[in-house]
Amino acid sequence: MPNIDFKDVDRHSPICFNGNCPSCGECLRYKAGQQSPETLRYHLCVVPQAIKGDRCELYQSAEPVRVAYGFSRSYDDVMKRDFTPMRKELTAYLGNKRGYYKYLRGEWPLIPEQQRHIEAVFRRYGYEGKVVYDRMEDVFELEAVPY
């Protein structure tokens, strides 16, 4: 079971204290609850009613997610004619110019889905295998759930 740092747990991500859940041994939400500080007084929590049979509706695997930071070096071999259309396409995908540059410089992590999309754009322009990230990191990311 991974060790997570409770300071990385978002307040919109439920944690769990249901030790009688059959899935608690492999659940990241339960692990986050176990790592909660002594000073914690309230937090969004999974209630026992979420357990249906042998599975919890809010179960989340304790597998780490591999995120990437920064991809500016990927443009080193991109031809000038391709640079602007590629940048525009990625800017639209990543939200806006501000977001694009935050991801480009490695200030925000790129989740695997975003990495695949960026790599697909580079492939479409003929730059197979050219996406180079500044660094990769395994993180434990609790998913937020709608109330």
Image (cartoon, rainbow, N blue to C red):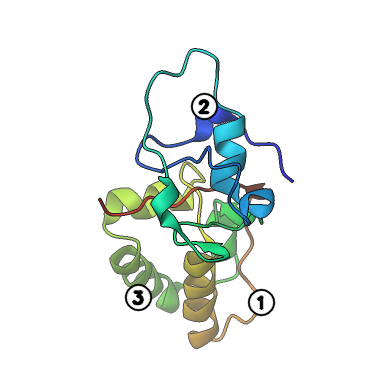
Q: Any mark on residue 7, and which? A: 2
Location of residue 115 with respect to 101 vertically, above or below: below
Q: Which residue is mark 1?
A: 129
Image spot of residue 124 (x, y percent): 49, 87
Circles 3, 1 touching at the beta carbon (< 8 Å) = no
Front in this rendered view, residue 118 or 49: 49
Amino acid type shown at disc 2: Lys
Identify the amino acid type marked 1. Answer: Gly
Query: Between 1 and 125, which is closer to the camera in this rendering?
Result: 1
Sequence order check: which comes first, mark 2 or mark 1? 2
At label 3, which amino acid type do we have?
A: Pro
Residue positioned 38% across, 30% down in the render: 43
Neighbour class for label 2 at 10 Å: few (<14), some, many (≥20)? few
> In the displayed structure, would residue 137 be above or below residue 59?
above
Front tag of 3 and 1: 1
Please name the residue that numbered disc 3 is placed on. 85
* Rendering coords of residue 51 (x, y %): 47, 57
Residue contact between numbered discs 3 and 2, judged by CB atoms under 8 Å: no
Q: Is residue 99 left or right of residue 54?
A: left
Check disc 3 and report its element: helix, strand or loop: helix
When asked about the image quadrant of residue 97, the answer is bottom left
